[in-house]
Image: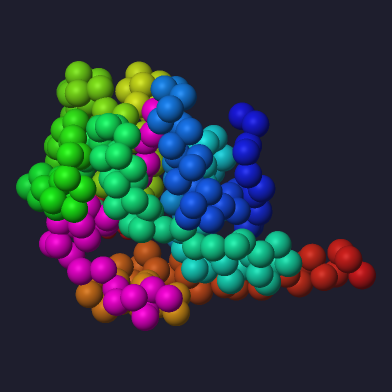
Amino acid sequence: MNRPCQSVRILGVRVDDVTMAEALALMEGMVASGQPHQVVTVNAEFVMRAQRDEAFRVVLEEAHLALPDGYGLLWAARRLGRPLRERVAGSDIVPRLAALAAQRGYRPFLLGAGPGVAEKAAKVLVRQNPGLQIAGTYAGSPAREEEEAIVARIVAAQPDMLFVAYGAPAQDFWIHRNLRRLGVPLCMGVGGTLDFIAGVAPRAPLWMREHGLEWLYRLIRQPWRWRRMLALPRFALAVGRECRALRRRSR
Ligand code: UDP
C-alpha cells in the first residue's frame, strides 16, 4: 500500500507519524473508500511482542495505519533521532470517530469487552452524539469456535466501523484473520476503550496521561498486569542498545 504518511521504525516495528487530526482524516478516507482497512494502536508492549512473535509482526506490518498509541514510543523515537510528533491513543480517537460517525451517518459496531459493556458504551456514545446510529453490539469472545457466527453477525449488520475489544494481541489477530470477509472499511482493536466509555473501568487522570504514566495507573488498578508490563523495562533496554548501535555505526 502507498502510505500517505511518514513512518518511524522502532526496533523494526513501523509506527506512523500522524497527529490526531491527520489520523482522523485518514480514517475518514478509509470509510469513504468502502474497502476494508485495519488500524493498530502500537505501544511498547506491541513492539516487544513483535520481537518474538513473527505472526504479530506481520499483522502490524500489514496494518493500513499504525497509530503511535504509547508514550514509550514517543520517548524511543526521540532517542533514536526520528521523533514522532504526537501520541494518538486508540482510547482518545474512538470518541472522536463516534462524533464523526454521527455527523456523516456512519454506523459503528462495538465488539468484545465483558457482558453488557458494549451495549453500555453504545448508549453513552449515542447520548454524547445525538443521531449516532450503532450498527450493533456483541460481547462474544475471540475463541475460534465463535468466529464464524460473529463474522456472520457483523456482515449482516453492515457497519462502516468495527471496534474490537478483545485485548491485544487477540483483537488484532482476530481482525487480521477476518478483514477481507468482514468487508468493514475501518476495523480497529481498541483494548480497554469500551470499558472506559461504558464507565466500568476508570481511565487514568489527565495529568498521569500527559506525563506518560497511564501504564502506572493501570498497574495499580490491575496488579495482574505486572508480568505483561515487564515488557516496558525490556523495551527501554532494547531501545538503549539500538541507540548505542546507531552511534557506533555513524562514527
Ligand atoms: N476481553 C474480552 N475477551 C477476551 C479478552 C479480553 O472481551 O477474551 C476484553 C476485556 O473485557 C476488556 C478488553 O478486552 O474490555 C481489553 O482488555 P485489556 O485491558 O487486557 O486490553 P489492553 O487495553 O491492555 O489491550
Give the percent coordinates (x, y) of residue 69.
46, 58
Indicate the quadrant where residue 213 lies: bottom left
Give the percent coordinates (x, y) of residue 50.
52, 50
Instruction: Name the image quarter holding the N terminus.
Output: top right
Q: Nearer the viewer, residue 216 or 56?
A: 216
Give the percent coordinates (x, y) of residue 30.
46, 32
Kindly give the residue lying farthest to the left in the view shown.
116
Magenta region, residue range: 185-210
Indicate the quadrant where residue 192 lies: bottom left
> Can residue 81 be seen?
yes
> Can residue 113 be seen?
no
Indicate the quadrant where residue 214 lies: bottom left
Give the percent coordinates (x, y) of residue 185.
39, 28
Residue 231 in the image: above or below residue 219: above
Q: With 231 as the anchor, is 194 left or right in this view?
A: left
Q: With 142 as the anchor, is 26 left or right in this view?
A: right
The residue positioned 7% from the left and 47% from the top of the image is: 116
Magenta-span inclusion, residue 117 = no
Residue 101 in the image: above or below residue 83: above
Q: With 31 as the anchor, is 74 left or right in this view?
A: right
The residue positioned 56% from the left and 52% from the top of the image is: 18
Instruction: Name the image quarter holding the C terminus.
Output: bottom right
The residue positioned 29% from the left and 77% from the top of the image is: 205
Colouring scheme applied when the structure was drawn? rainbow
Q: Nearer the viewer, residue 163 or 143?
A: 163
Residue 54 in the image: above or below residue 41: above
The residue positioned 43% from the left and 27% from the top of the image is: 32
